[in-house]
Amino acid sequence: MNQANPLILGIESSCDETGVGLVRGTELLTNTVSSSMDEHVRFGGVIPEIASRAHLDAFVPTLAAALSDAGVTLEEVDAIAVTTGPGLAGALMVGVSAAKALALATGKPLYAINHLVAHVGVGLLDKSIAAQYDGGALPENLGALLVSGGHTEILRVRSIASDVQLLGATIDDAAGEAFDKVARLLGLSYPGGPAIDKLAREGNAKAIRFPRGLTMPKYMGTAEAPGPHRYDFSFSGLKTAVARCVEGYEARGEEVPVADIAASFQEAVLDVITAKAVLACREQGVTTLLLGGGVAANSRLRELAGQRCLAAGITLLVPSLSLCTDNGAMVAALGAQLVMNGVAPSDLAFATDSSLPVTTISL
Amino acid sequence: MRILTIDTSAIASAALLDFDPQDPVKTAELVANFATVDTRSQAEELAPGVKSLFTDPVAEGPALDAIIVGTGPGPFTGLRSGIAMARTLSFTWGVPLYGMMSLDALAQQVFDTPKKDSAGRALGPLAMDDFVIATDARRKEVYWAKYSAGAHLLDGPHVGPAADIFGVPVFGAGAGLYEEVLVGNRCTVHAPLAHAQPTALELGRAAIRKITAAGSLEGAGLLDSTPLYLRESDAKVPGPRKRAL
Ligand SMILES: [Zn+2]
């Protein structure tokens, strides 16, 4: 195996994207994604069974397309990496079964890896980010803010291959999930993130003061004596507050100011996310923050995170959007780091873990 | 001819079988076999199990004549793990892939199991007439299909309560689970096969019977690898939001 510059095939199936990516060291060869998003539109959210059925049918065609796009054969691949968690249990099972089949059929080593850590590893593939650092390595004192329909976390990354810590996470809904639910309340299309982002530009973000979850002193505490949820998020109360607000207008027979509500809701979510992420960075000695997850596409999140990181002297890294959303290249990127760091591959008998902790980088 | 069979419609199992498609008399030779005991560890145990069938899977896999996978019906997540495995092996090795209804495996087992008296003497086939194979579909229902005494599919597969089945011998884990209901419907439930699950070994035997009868793999009327879910996903399209008035 080429351990210095390995060719890795990465497989992702933790939510509604079937992804197969090929990476050589830190060079992206292909990032092939088949999404079942269209099948979830009428339900207003990802339906796990529909996603699992779509993964089963999409996997082999996506694999074939990725190999042909990159112009490589399976024999040339040095190792295979697959997301084993966290994510939807039934969806993970499809990618993992296929990855195990690939490994046993080719005799290649298999790495069962953590989806959240892969969102960080993908930063290595982005040319504009790599240009800022030497030797294809992630910067020192690195943190990550991951925001998507399935997760919302702040991580500290001391070593991408061996030392990742969870600083904060949502205790209920993921931020992207809150966008989907509020979009439905406002009669907007799925997925809710882009719809709210667009409408919010026409609204007044200060029109309605929605609650900021887990920001009260009893949750925050102080830097010296942190409260129980200093860096954590909660979005379910906010979602309820939006529902009450809409109902209030309707009960009074007034027109619902959807643009103002969208802007105010979005501001409430992103204000807390960016404030807590920057707070965590300052208190934990993080000097570079990498943004990941599908919600990184949100223009206001990029703007607010940019302003606040700049003010706090933190370098903000935002990979290109196709690398931020769930994909196989990020899995391959992390797999390559594991190989380059001499981490042992996984045993073929490993199990998926829908709530795999970020501290477990690979099994 | 050498085939690899995989079934994860209940337990996880795989088998490697050799046979001569032109010679129906010559019995199939089992090369290697693997089966789990329970129905909850397919994803973990299947890959090591398939690997254990070969001395060198990388060299031997591409030399297979076919892979045949049980397409259910069965609980979805487990079922998909076997089909994902079979489809990916087929792609990687360049070996043709076929599907077979998993209940056919149990029908073959009924066909192959002689009825015995108390002294253990064979009294002819276990099913003298039409019979039903039923497996556990959870949610108080069974997956079932009706077969002729010769183990040819007559009707099904269906999913529904065991109470839908009337007046036939019933075999398989669904029979043991709902024995009382079935007996009340004038069905008979036979102890030796009242708790049996489909296995890749029996699925392979059923496949070989079809292939030797046809004289070729292509003519055997095997299915493709599309899973037989029989149930829609439970998702409901949300109705319009109630307005507050
Ligand atoms: Zn993700």
Image: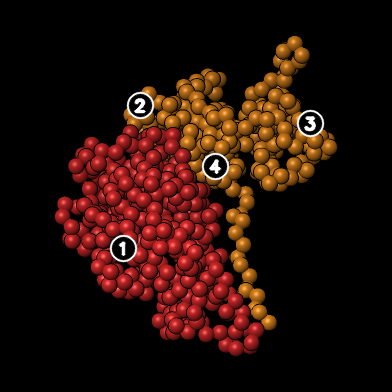
Chain colours: A red, B orange
Q: Which residue is more in the foreground, A117 or B52?
A: A117
The type of residue carrying mark 4 is: Leu
Q: Is residue A91 visible?
A: no
Q: Residue at x 52, y 60 (%)?
A: A172
Percent of width and height locating residue B148? 70, 33
Give the Cα distance between marks 2 and 3. Answer: 46 Å
Q: Which percent across, then down, holds residue B82?
A: 50, 39
- Tell me which amino acid carries mark 3: Thr
Locate the C terminus of chain A by quadrant.
Answer: top left
Cα distance in 3D space between marks 4 and 3: 28 Å
Whether residue B238 is visible to the viewer of this picture, yes or no, is: yes
* Residue B56 image label: 2
Tell me which chain the residue with mark 3 is part of: B
Q: In the rendered image, which residue does mark 3 sit on? A: B188
Which of the labelled discs sits on residue B79, or is there none?
4
Distance (Cα) linking label 2 and label 1:
54 Å
Q: Nearer the viewer, mark 2 or mark 1?
A: 1
SS of the residue at dot 3?
strand
Task: Please report the residue visible at 20 percent of the width from the left and 58 percent of the height from the top.
Answer: A130
Q: Residues within 10 Å of mark 2 (few under 14, many from 20)?
A: few
How packed mark 1 is, by other alpha carbons closer than 10 Å (few <14, some 14-19, many 20 or more), is some
Front residue of B101 and B235: B235
Judging from the image, mark 4 belongs to the subunit labelled B
Q: Chain of mark 1?
A: A
